[in-house]
Amino acid sequence: MMMVRKSKGLGERHQKILDFIASYQRERKHPPSIREIGEFCDISSTSVVNYYLDQLEKSGNIERDRKISRGVRLTNSTPLGDIFRVPLYGVIQAGEPIPIPSSDFNSFTAEDSVDVAMSLMPTKEKGKDLFALKVQGESMIDAMVNDGDIIILKPIQEARNGEMVAVWLSDRNETTLKFFFKEKERYRLQPANPTMKPIYINKNETLEIKGKVVMVIRKVERQI
Amino acid sequence: MMMVRKSKGLGERHQKILDFIASYQRERKHPPSIREIGEFCDISSTSVVNYYLDQLEKSGNIERDRKISRGVRLTNSTPLGDIFRVPLYGVIQAGEPIPIPSSDFNSFTAEDSVDVAMSLMPTKEKGKDLFALKVQGESMIDAMVNDGDIIILKPIQEARNGEMVAVWLSDRNETTLKFFFKEKERYRLQPANPTMKPIYINKNETLEIKGKVVMVIRKVERQI
DNA sequence: CTTGACACAGAACAAGCGTTCGAGTATTAT
DNA sequence: ATAATACTCGAACGCTTGTTCTGTGTCAAG
């Protein structure tokens, strides 16, 4: 029998256990027992599961209520309950490019992520490829997005008319949020604020759509 | 020994059990055992706890994984995990008064409530008296709040300078969101949008503050 | 008063479950 | 090759926990 041993960090056995605990908790609303973990991960002995659980506890991935049935819980990452954790890729700011979403699936901690309750998510956008950006500066104010707001975007390359998108205007060297409209010979980027005029982009010019805004969250601590 | 028997619905024993399960789950991240429930609710016999649990299951308040340790979970209401459930009292609209928060603590279902992840809540406002309103109409656009947005408010009577408040202007017969400033002889209600002019209210006029906005949530399905 | 539904206690049982120990095998280091 | 380390198994022990059964006191209807 082959054994896979990753020298440092979590082996695939550890990862599988963590994933199982997360999915089990999400579905059954309570943690799994040691034997259930073992069954799912093809571990025939409870002591082996215990062995891995000890390691996961030492490495800080789980917490255990010893002596208590099903007293396992994930610590960081994977939030409990009906929560969507969206990675926060950075700051969007006029004049700066949006940091590229690194395509590796490394887990992100609570520091650089945003939790959104399931029930708040727009129905269609429950895919896992969403990402969040923090808005810096008042330049988006015409899109009713304020400094400090958090926007949640769905990565897209082509927008449909009427969608609010984050675009990179290379000739203006500027990132901005606008409503997108495709017209005959050009693109129209329409601010939400009627007092502002739209931006027109010819179709031969570069227009790089980064993502489509699906949600805006504003924490109002104390403004102005 | 006196026994409290409510003819219909949940007795206070039932309610206490439900509350305990909710708080236990929230703190320990796993459901309580029958004996733990009994200890907390001053029930000396596990059979009595089981007796109540059966009733709560029949009435649809909980679900049970029989034979499985700590296989109790709340069904409706009380969301799992680090979620704040805020009651949605109705719609805020210029020209209409804000519906009064009924002060009884009856539970609210998911239909008329908004879930917010703990991690998103402004640190100070984790009290349980928050409420949510859905914004109708474009009249709040100068406060960067759009039609369809959900605002979460903390009920207050007196605002401090710079806070965004929902106020009822009885002489204008209008509800609106503005930034609040107390000046020498008057109140200044400052829109967030610099192109809009502030509203001045003399101190002898009626100015009814309904609540202070602590969060704005916008689901962007398809705008314009 | 009797009856029966209801609320409760206590004990005992069986299964669930975490823990521990002894032993064996594979991998890596020396 | 040898030792140390990492990993796995199986079984047994004992506490935890859900279940069930018998019995008691209360209260309202017949």
Image: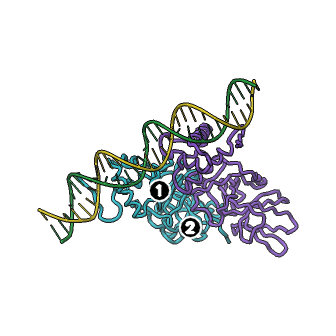
Chain colours: A purple, B cyan, C yellow, D green
What is the crowding at mark 2: few (fewer than 14 residues within 10 Å), some, or many (at least 20)?
many
Residue A43 placement, left or right of B52: right
Q: Which mark is residue B65?
A: 1
Q: Residues within 10 Å of mark 1 (few under 14, many from 20)?
A: few
Q: Is residue A160 left or right of residue A116?
A: right
Residue sitting at 78 percent across and 70 percent down?
A188
Residue at image mark 2? B135
- A52 or A133: nearer the eye? A52
Residue A66, position in %: x, y? 50, 39
Q: Residue furthest right?
A: A204
In the rendered image, the vertical position of residue D27 relative to residue A111, given as above or below: below
Q: Whole-percent x and y of residue B217?
A: 60, 61
Most foreground residue, B76 or B197: B76
Q: Secondary structure at mark 1?
A: loop
Q: Are marks 2 and 1 on the same chain?
A: yes
The chain letter under disc 1 is B
For the residue marked with disc 2, what is the amino acid? Val
Q: Chain of mark 2?
A: B
Q: Tell me what residue is drawn at x 45 percent, y 54 percent.
A: B72
Q: How far apart are labels 2 and 1 at the CA level?
A: 42 Å
Q: Vertically, is A17 above or below A155?
A: above
| Residue A222, visible in the rendered structure | no
- Residue at 40% over, 63% down: B58
Q: Of the residues shown, which amino acid type is indicated by label 1?
A: Asp
Residue closest to the eye, B167 or B90: B90
Q: Position of residue A52 (x, y in %)?
A: 61, 40
Question: Seen in the image, is B2 located left or right of residue B124?
Answer: left
Find residue A50 and report its image quarter: top right
Position of residue D5 measured from the top left corner of the image (x, y, whole percent): 67, 30
Residue for point 50% across, 51% down: B126
